[in-house]
Image (cartoon, grey):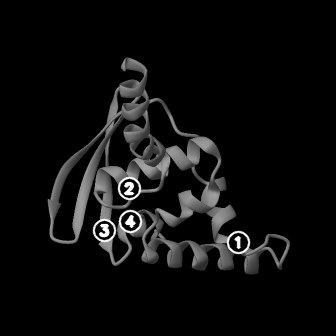
Amino acid sequence: MRLKLASLLLLLTMPTLAGCNRPSYETPVRAYQTFLRSVQRGDEKTAYATLSQASQDALLARAQAVAQASSGAVKADPLAFFLSNIPPPADVAEVTLAGESGDTAKVSVVSSGVTRQVQMVREPSGWKIDLTQSLQQP
């Protein structure tokens, strides 16, 4: 009887456990955690997909500018440009919602004892990381 009960409980929790590593854009915190996990695993496409469309457009423009300035020696690949310019994830201890207003939010990320805020935007596909301010030319 106990074996049947244990088997039933395991079967009921399997879908929940399997979903833990799936990309999720339902909340700002889950979207950031999706980004973090994908970078840690080297899943470049998922990491890039966590960025807002405006961020992706800005990265494309930057990658094209670099490619043009290099006379084609550097490929205009926004994904490679993005990933080559972010450091490996530090020891992230906590990700929490700092605030949400309409279609924008901020998450607080505690890493190596330092707290940083990350801007998030809600798009039709869910919450995404918004890097547009940091990608603007000085």
Q: Nearer the viewer, residue 45 or 63?
A: 45
Percent position of residue 123, x then y: 33, 75
**3D distance between C-alphas at marks 2 and 1:** 23 Å
Q: With 28 as the anchor, is 69 left or right in this view?
A: right
Q: Residue furthest top?
A: 2
Mark 1 = which residue? Answer: 77
- Where disc 3 sits, the SS reads strand
Q: Residue at x 51, y 44 (%)?
A: 37
Mark 4 = which residue? Answer: 130
Q: Residues within 10 Å of mark 2 (few under 14, many from 20)?
A: many
Q: Residues within 10 Å of mark 1 (few under 14, many from 20)?
A: some
Mark 2 = which residue? Answer: 31
User: Along the polypeptide, which appears first: circle 3 or circle 4?
Assistant: 3
Task: Name the mark on residue 63.
Answer: none
Q: Do the numbered discs 4 and 2 sit on residues whose CB atoms are within 8 Å?
A: no
Closer mark to the observer between disc 4 and disc 2: 2
**3D distance between C-alphas at marks 4 and 1:** 19 Å
Percent position of residue 6, x then y: 39, 25
Q: Nearer the viewer, residue 12 or 76?
A: 12
Q: Residues within 10 Å of mark 4 (few under 14, many from 20)?
A: many
User: Along the polypeptide, which appears first: circle 4 or circle 1?
Assistant: 1
| Figure quadrant of the N terminus | top left
Closer mark to the observer between disc 3 and disc 1: 3
